[in-house]
Image (cartoon, helix red, strand yellow):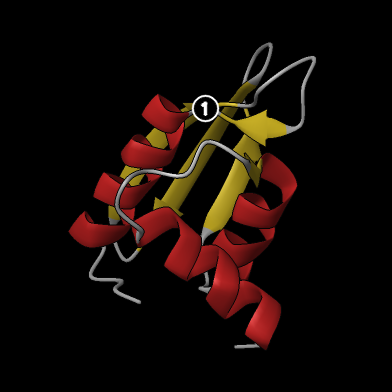
Amino acid sequence: MQRKHQRTLEGIFTKPTSPNINWSDIEILLRVLGAEISEGSGSRTRVKLNGVRAVFHRPHPQKETDKGAVNSVKRFLENAGVKP
């Protein structure tokens, strides 16, 4: 994993939750971790990693993911067995 991806992973797991992580960085991290990503309707993104599935909403019009979505990604990663 490259340093940029490691920083994104650490940003997801920081406390307090960071509200300024770009969704594209999260999506790239998920792909690097081996996740299967597919587009849903609208801004939905379906993700499967290590047998765990989730649906996330891509933020728009801004690029940054809000705190609630970052917490959802964090729970998803924990359930999939990923830790920083």
Picture residue at 74% right of the left edge, 17% below the top:
60
Picture residue at 23% right of the left edge, 70% below the top:
81
**Height in image: 34 above or below 11?**
below
Q: Which residue is mark 1?
A: 66
Image x and y of residue 36, in percent: 55, 56
Image x and y of residue 49, in percent: 39, 60
Instruction: Name the side, left or right, on which 49 lies relative to 11.
Output: left
In the image, 7 versus 58, the foreground residue is 7
Which image quarter holds the N terminus?
bottom right
Instruction: Name the side, left or right, on which 11 lies relative to 65.
Output: left
Q: Amino acid at mark 1?
A: Asp
Q: Residues within 10 Å of mark 1 (few under 14, many from 20)?
A: some
Instruction: Name the side, left or right, on which 71 lies relative to 7.
Output: left
- Secondary element at image label 1: loop
Picture residue at 43% right of the left edge, 55% below the top:
12
In the image, 58 versus 12, the foreground residue is 12
